[in-house]
Image: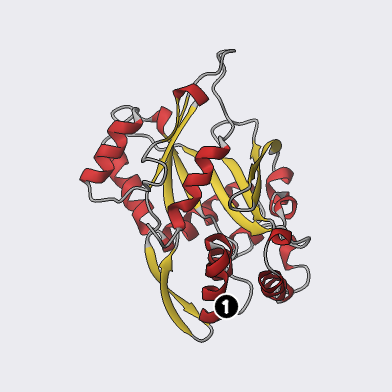
């Protein structure tokens, strides 16, 4: 099915996401069953800073749909760069797109990633729904494992390609669970494991943003030479606070996002 409108793209992204992260659908359904309304704060996408698939390429369909660039972020330790985009209609999710800074990695990793991107059919990245088309290249378990030695992030993109890395519940819209600690306790009581890197709550009221997330669920992924069970996607939760001017903070906090990225790390 050809997707050419923003609502159709967002719907496709959600259904693709819950297909490989059914825990998100389970949590969403549990909260709705508690009488809550789920509003999505943001969707995150991952890519490489290659000219064909960099952040600006990934952002095209959203820009076409009225989104505006609203901030950028640097992650020196993980060698990542990111931008976020907002739509004038604030009921629509923000879009957070990060890219791996290839020039800061080994020649071997750069060669591997370039070889993956070279497999993308000419012009495929220009499709409106490219950000939700999955893995556009052939990749082996060895390539995945070799990339993992240098970067969890690179390995994740090699395995899953172009699809949402996570969706995010906007805690401010919740009633019973509008406190992030109360929500976290509820999720743990239901048996969900949270990302504890840097603490279960990342950020604070002082920086106008609190975040938490589940750990990515492990799923069996088919590679071109076999199968591996690896971390897939996770579900995030964000509570936003007013800035000094009284407006609700809409950006992101790099120090917190740095730890959120670790929701897909194999070490947790």
Q: From what the image shows, is residue 64 above or below residue 137?
A: above
x and y percentages locating residue 138 in the rendered image: 61, 79
Total labels: the figure holds 1
> What is the quadrant of the C terminus in the image?
bottom left
Residue at the outermost left position? 189
Q: Residue at x 55, y 13 (%)?
A: 246
Quarter that holds the N terminus: bottom right
Tell me if residue 250 comes above or below residue 69 in the rendering. above
Would residue 135 appear left or right of 171 to someone viewing this image? right
Foreground of the two, 142 or 162: 142
Q: In the image, residue 174 lies at what x, y percent?
A: 36, 30
Along the viewing direction, whichever of 205 and 233 lies nearer the viewer: 205
Can I make out residue 93 in this image?
no
Residue depicted at 52% across the width and 52% down the height: 11
Camera-side residue: 86 or 79? Answer: 79
Give the side of residue 151 with respect to residue 211, left or right.
right
**Front one among 87 and 199:** 199
144 vs 207: above or below: below
Secondary structure state at the residue bearing disc 1: helix
Q: Which residue is mark 1?
A: 143
Residue 233, position as x, y percentages in the image: 45, 57
The residue depicted at 69 percent of the width and 56 percent of the height is 101
Q: How is the image coloured?
A: secondary structure
Residue 81 shown left or right of residue 18 in the figure: right
**Residue 123, x across and y down, in percent:** 78, 68
Q: How packed is label 1: few (under 14 Cα within 10 Å), some, or many (20 or more)? A: some
Q: Residue furthest bottom?
A: 225
Q: Quadrant of residue 151?
A: bottom right
Q: Image quarter for residue 212?
A: top left
**Residue 241 seen in the figure:** yes
């Amino acid at each position: 099915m050809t997707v050419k409108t923003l609502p159709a793209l967002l719907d496709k992204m959600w259904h693709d996401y819950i297909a490989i992260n059914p825990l998100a659908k389970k949590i969403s359904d549990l909260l709705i069953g508690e009488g809550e309304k789920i509003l999505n704060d943001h969707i995150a996408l991952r890519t490489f800073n290659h000219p064909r698939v960099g952040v600006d390429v990934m952002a095209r369909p959203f820009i076409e749909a009225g989104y505006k660039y609203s901030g950028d972020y640097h992650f020196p330790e993980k060698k990542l760069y990111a931008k976020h985009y907002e739509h004038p209609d604030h009921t629509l999710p923000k879009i957070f797109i990060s890219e791996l800074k290839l020039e800061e990695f080994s020649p071997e990793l750069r060669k591997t990633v370039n070889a993956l991107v070279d497999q993308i059919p000419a012009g495929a990245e220009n499709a409106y729904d490219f950000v939700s088309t999955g893995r556009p290249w052939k990749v082996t378990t060895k390539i995945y494992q070799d990339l993992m030695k240098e970067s969890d992030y690179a390995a994740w993109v090699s395995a899953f390609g172009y699809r949402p890395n996570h969706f995010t519940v906007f805690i401010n819209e919740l009633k019973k669970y509008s406190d992030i600690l109360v929500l976290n306790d509820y999720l743990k009581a239901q048996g969900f494991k949270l990302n504890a890197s840097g603490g279960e709550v990342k950020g604070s009221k002082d920086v106008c943003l609190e975040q938490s997330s589940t750990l990515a669920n492990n799923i069996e992924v088919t590679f071109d030479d076999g199968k591996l069970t690896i971390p897939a996607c996770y579900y995030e939760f964000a509570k936003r606070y007013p800035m000094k001017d009284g407006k609700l903070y809409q950006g992101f906090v790099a120090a917190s996002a740095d730890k959120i990225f670790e929701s897909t790390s194999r070490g947790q």
